[in-house]
Image: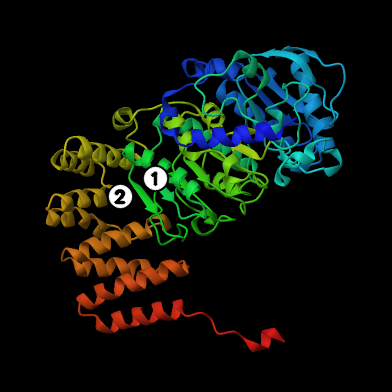
Amino acid sequence: MFTVKKYLSLRSSVDLLSRFFVFLCIFSLSGLSAQTNQVLAENMVIVVNDNDPDSLAIGKYYAQQRGVPESRIVPLNMPTEETITVTQYVERVANPLLNELLDREWVKGVKDGAKDHFGRERLAVSIHNISYVVLIKGVPLRIANDATLLEEGTDKLPKQFRVNNGSVDGELALLLAPPSTSMTALIPNPYFGKSSISSTDANRILRVSRLDGPSKANVIQVIDRTLEAEQTGLMGRGYIDTGGPHEKGDAWIRAAGEMVEAAYFDTDFETTKRAMDYRDRLDAPAIYMGWYRPRAQAQWLAPKWSVPAGAIGFHLHSFSGTSLRTTKTWLGALVAQGYCATVGNVYEPYLEYTHRPQVLLAHLMSGGNFGEAVAVSMPALSWQSVALGDPLYRPFKVSLQDQLTQSQDSNFAAYASIRESNRLLATEGSDAAIAFARSKFLKQPSLALAYRLAQLYAGAGREREGGEALKIIRYISKFSVDEFVLVQKIANFLHKYDESPLALRLYQSILEERDLDKRLKISLYEGGAPVALACGEATLASRWQLEARTLKTPPTPNPAKKK
């Protein structure tokens, strides 16, 4: 049973580890990084819901794509609801899966003589070589609390831990744990922050991840785009959104952002209390880390947003994964947008017992796979966490140098060039960075690369040359929604360096778009007004200023609606 002593011990270890996360990226778990993905695939277990046709179809597709033998697919007669009772979990998920693993001899063990307090069959001893357990869409997500099943002595726990609710994933991680292991409260994760663990612990823990989402098509897309990213390497920008309610969470996300920058990704930070939205750059969001909004909003719900293959997304919120069948939750929205790796919570986890984003990202950036990264970044099992993504996924399998020579046909190849120009700026200086960015721009012109080249020129005191590079925009008549703020930034650069007529045309072009977000409209009107004035368009400037004020004015209450 989870005791007060274990609770205090875990809390102390969490505080200590949070100070030393940055070094975890050099570690690998039990030598697994040295094994090939094929070996890991052959030792994987894929669990599907026999009552959900999509579940079996997705499971088979994933097995085919990853070279997992179809015999490693385990169909179970499970409920189709996302939320199930403790009894349903025990009788329809845990016990059947345990017996399947034993019958197929993927686990060797001796059953305990009796079922535990919850009705679970338990193993007195066990040995296994299962790499990962992958739960497929259709497998229940979370277990509802049952106060009638709380064991004697749980009244000594802090009130918030006197629960047996949690994620199915977090409970299945302890399927092979000793008979005394409780479902109440949480259990320290032996993998958390470790370079290796004892063979005893390894044989008692299953590492679980999930391929799930709002639709079958979303999940198939995750599988396909994960494999695509492993061929091309992750390309795009970093978006880091702090300003949450607790400094500790901000520090975690800020540390993750510093790693993204240190890897030379072009990175934007939002450090105020407002969330990133349509007023920010949205192009090529390869890595997103943020918090603390209860629901996905703005661009996260957009029907079309160009997310790079293999994108990593993280939004820290207590209820980010209460359902995966809707885009109202963060995990559902991220998967629907095309993100391939994300983590979250099904019930309130409390900040200390959530995934550490900086540890997760550090392990991935060191070349590790998603399954390992999840294991080292989660402090607790039998709790609220869920991880969505292919456990074999290695977003940094392809180096930046290989991207520059092998992946130039990608739609996001310009962002690899931007990353290399950032590296050259840091290591060799502005001349080398400009020369490289200019050579790539001449071969494959793009707005993002043009803007970065202009910034590099400006940083070297060569603003005019930067303005010339940006004039490529004259030949583009239509922009996508994810480019609007990038175009606005280009317009502002041109205006600053005496190209106001072209800047004004850009503002007018975007403002002609239909269904612009209200906050973006205000930003465009306010940004465009001084540009219009500089071009002698005083009437237009005044109109845009008025439009901005009108949009910012709160609507007048309608007394009739109160009656």
Q: Is residue 478 left or right of residue 368?
A: left
Nearer the observer, 445 or 78: 78
Where is residue 84, by image quadrant? top right
Regarding residue 32, the answer to whether it shows in the image is yes
Where is residue 371, by image quadrant? top right
Regarding residue 395, the answer to whether it shows in the image is no
Nearer the observer, 493 or 116: 116
Q: For the point 35% across and 73% down, which residue is it?
A: 525
Where is residue 544, by image quadrant? bottom left
Give the x, y percent position of residue 453. Answer: 21, 48
Q: Quadrant of the C terminus?
A: bottom right
**Count the marks: how many?**
2
Q: Is residue 181 left or right of residue 477?
A: right
User: What amino acid is found at the position of numbered circle 2 in the picture?
Assistant: Ala
Label 2 Cα neighbours within 10 Å, binned few <14 / some 14-19 / many ≥20 = many
SS at mark 2 in the image: helix
SS at mark 1 in the image: strand
Q: For the point 53% across and 26% down, which residue is it?
A: 372
Q: Is residue 15 left or right of residue 282?
A: right
Image marks 2 and 1: residues in contact by CB distance under 8 Å: no
Q: For the point 47% across and 34% down, which residue is it?
A: 359
User: What amino acid is found at the position of numbered circle 1 in the picture?
Assistant: Gly
Give the x, y percent position of residue 159. Answer: 73, 46
Q: Which residue, given by chain and number where applicable, does mark 1 sit on?
A: 238
Q: Nearer the viewer, mark 2 or mark 1?
A: 1
Mark closer to the chain start, 2 or 1: 1
Q: CA distance from mark 2 to mark 1?
A: 13 Å
Q: Which residue, given by chain and number where applicable, does mark 2 sit on?
A: 448
